[in-house]
């Protein structure tokens, strides 16, 4: 017999909690460490400052396909060539030389595992520049 799916109801301010376990269709929550929240906020601010600097330095053209990037600065336009989510490239998270200015479509292609040829070239050049494999 299939379990009945119960939608998760969120109350204002409940984003500071993470799911713990399901009991009788109800979800219990445990509080998240406030220090963890503060660290994540600080990390986000540092990355945004890096993106602001990168946005000012580069012409607003996709370095992968060449299309014009118009409008305001958004995080989706800044691609980490060597992904900082992988432990071996964590030290390159705040390196401006590890960023590439790309359009939404090119960033999405790379994130889905289908980077353009130009994107692949930039990634290989970054590996050589930072002497990593």
Image: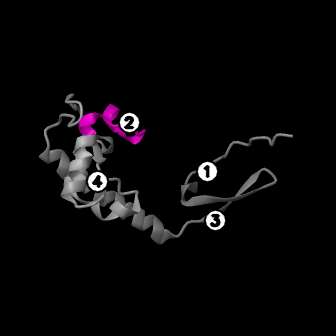
Residue 58 image point, x, y percent: 14, 43
Span colored in magenta: 102-119
Q: Residue most toward the top?
A: 67
Pointers 3 and 1 in contact (CB under 8 A)? no
Nearer the viewer's eye, disc 1 or disc 2? 2
Q: Is residue 51 above or below residue 118?
A: below
Report the front residue among 127 and 92. 127
- The alpha-carbon separation of the residues under discs 1 and 4 comes to 28 Å
Q: Pointer 4: what residue? A: 48
Q: Pointer 3: what residue? A: 30
* Among numbered discs 1 and 4, the one appearing first in the sequence: 1
Nearer the viewer's eye, disc 1 or disc 4? 4
- The alpha-carbon separation of the residues under discs 4 and 2 comes to 26 Å
* Among numbered discs 4 and 2, the one appearing first in the sequence: 4
Q: Is residue 3 above or below residue 88?
A: above
- The alpha-carbon separation of the residues under discs 1 and 2 comes to 38 Å
Residue 46 image point, x, y percent: 29, 60
- The alpha-carbon separation of the residues under discs 4 and 3 comes to 29 Å
Secondary structure of the magenta portion, mostly?
A: helix
The picture quadrant where one finds residue 129 is: bottom left
Q: Pointer 1: what residue? A: 11
- Label 4 Cα crowd, 10 Å radius (few <14 / some 14-19 / many 20+): some
* Among numbered discs 1 and 2, the one appearing first in the sequence: 1
Number of numbered callouts drawn: 4
Q: Pointer 2: what residue? A: 114
């Amino acid at each position: 017999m299939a379990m009945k799916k119960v939608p998760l109801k969120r109350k204002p301010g409940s984003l500071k909690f993470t799911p713990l376990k399901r009991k009788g269709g109800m979800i219990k929550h445990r509080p998240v460490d406030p220090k963890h929240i503060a660290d994540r906020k600080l990390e986000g601010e540092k990355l945004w400052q890096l993106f602001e600097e990168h946005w000012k330095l580069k012409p607003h053209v996709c370095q992968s396909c060449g299309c014009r990037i118009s409008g305001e600065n958004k995080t989706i336009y800044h691609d980490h060539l060597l992904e900082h989510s992988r432990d071996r490239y964590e030290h390159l998270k705040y390196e401006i030389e590890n960023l590439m200015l790309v359009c939404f479509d090119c960033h999405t292609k790379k994130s889905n595992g289908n980077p353009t040829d130009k994107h692949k070239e930039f990634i290989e050049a970054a590996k050589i520049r930072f002497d990593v494999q």
